Amino acid sequence: MASWELELQQPPRDARAFELWLQHVAGRILFEDVRGYALEQMDPELSAEARAAAEKAIDDAVYGLMMVIDGVSGALGNDEHTVELSVLVQLVNRESGEIAEEIDLREGDGMCLGYHGWLEGDYGEDPVAILKPKQA
């Protein structure tokens, strides 16, 4: 399923719980729209062995992305400069377009750490999203 099929839940009020919640929301988006997309693209005719190898490759690629987001890898430099990637998670007010809160994931608790729970469908104590109701 893609993230557009989900409805964001209300963030917790506690500052620390909110910070973790926002990171889990980012993980959910990446798992639905990157990992989920890749899994859906697999040929349904693949053998069980080929499917397992493809799933491992997808999971390894997503983990590699998490390492770049965390700053473990992903910098390119020379004697004078370094180029690094930064991924921001923003809670945006839909009506005004204003950014209510923002976290640079590199400064968070670690996308690599969250990855293992997300593989199991664990997105933290506070719900991040539910399936949108079907429109009649």
Image: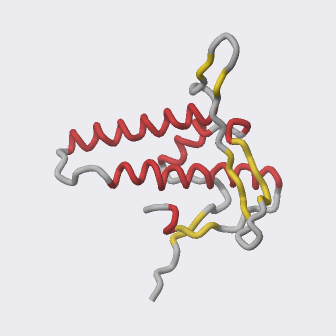
Who's the residue at 46% across and 81% down the image? 134
Q: 76 or 119, which lies in front?
A: 76
In this rendering, is residue 57 above or below 77?
A: below
- Residue 81 position within the rendered picture, expressed as x and y whole percent measured from the top left: 69, 19
Give the answer, above or below, for where 8 lies relative to 79.
below
Q: Tell whether 59 sits left or right of 20.
A: left
Residue at x 48% of width, y 46% of height? 119
The residue lying at 19 percent from left, 47 percent from top is 46
Q: Quadrant of the C terminus?
A: bottom left
Residue 74: quarter of image: top right
Q: Is residue 64 left or right of residue 38?
A: right
The number of callouts visible is 0
Extreme residue toward the bottom, this view: 136
Up-down relation of residue 121 to residue 87 (above or below): below
Point out the residue furthest to the top here: 79
| Residue 57: x %, y % from top left | 36, 36
In the image, residue 42 above or below residue 69: below
Which quarter of the rendering shows the N terminus? Answer: bottom left
Residue at 28%, 41% in the rendered image: 52
User: Which residue is situated farthest in the front direction here?
Assistant: 80
Q: How far across and how far down the image is residue 6, in percent? A: 53, 67
Q: How is the image coloured?
A: secondary structure
User: Residue 61, percent across and down?
Assistant: 43, 36
109 lies left or right of 35: right
